Amino acid sequence: MAEPRRLLVAITGASGAVYGWRLLQELATAPGVELHAVVSDAGWLTLQHELGLQAHDLRPLVHTLHDAGQVGAGPASGSFRCAGMVLAPCSMRSLAAIAHGLSDNLITRAADVMLKERRRLVLMTRESPLHLGHLRNMCTVTEMGAIVCPPMPAFYLRPQSVTDIVNASVARVLDLLEVPHTLSERWTGLPCDTAASA
């Protein structure tokens, strides 16, 4: 029997905790996935403020809910075979720490491990507007091998609700993790008559 594919979702303190929550919900039902999660102190604040969620809401969805302060936990080591990690959302503080190799908690250490092991690391960065330091940090992590994937509304899909907008961004992340889903419609191109008249 094949080993389950281990994935790690981190929720940090940027607005948009719903992205991490929705991602956990989808991955929890994905076949062959062993799901791990870790939430920063500020991440817990946003989960509570924006969604009214606490640790007991997340635990049933995951194999292990790690403590962000436990830098000796499994995800801190390259021998912990994790196929992919997502920061959803990724605060500018976490982005900066990853860009500069500051492994000061389990989230930033696990991200550092993903980079050094050449594994998939996706950062759903959340901030607006961006100053030059933010942009340079995004460039730095991209050069290191991470994928910067800000949650951007896909209005061409004609979303009818906030849930539709969230699902579209989470679907893009699931694609990057190569996890099958039916969370959002896929673009198939404009109808021939529309394209011809443009």
Image: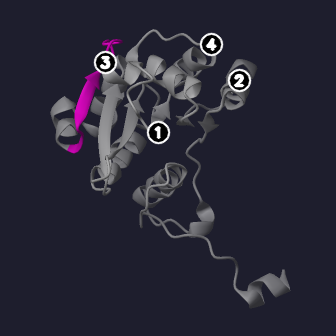
Q: Which residues are magenta?
A: 61-72
**Residue beneath the point at 48% across and 19% down:** 108
Quickly name the residue at label 3: 73
Residue in view at x 62 percent, y 13 percent? 100
User: Which numbered marker is on residue 84?
Assistant: 1
Q: How many labels sit on residues?
A: 4
Q: CA distance from mark 3 to mark 2?
A: 26 Å
Q: Given this view, does label 3 or label 2 mark the residue nearer the observer?
A: 3
4 or 3: mark nearer the eye:
3
Q: Nearer the viewer, residue 92 or 32?
A: 32
* Badge 2: residue crowd in 10 Å (few <14, some 14–19, many ≥20): some
Q: Amino acid at mark 2?
A: Thr
Q: Residue at x 45, y 23 (%)?
A: 78
Say the numbered circle drawn on residue 100. 4
Q: Looking at the image, do the residues carrying marks 1 and 2 touch, with CB atoms under 8 Å apart?
A: no
Q: Which residue is mark 2?
A: 140
Q: Position of residue 19 (x, y in %)?
A: 42, 43
Q: Amino acid at mark 4?
A: His
Image x and y of residue 61, in percent: 22, 44
Are the residues flagged by discs 1 and 4 in contact, CB closer than 8 Å? no
Q: CA distance from mark 4 to mark 3?
A: 21 Å
Which amino acid type corresponds to the residue marked 3 in the rendered image? Ala
Q: Is residue 187 visible?
A: yes
Residue 45 appears in the figure: no
Q: Which SS class for mark 1? A: strand
Residue 44 falls in image quadrant: top left
> How many angstroms separate mark 2 from mark 4 (CA)?
8 Å
Pick whichever of labels 3 and 1 is earlier in the sequence. 3
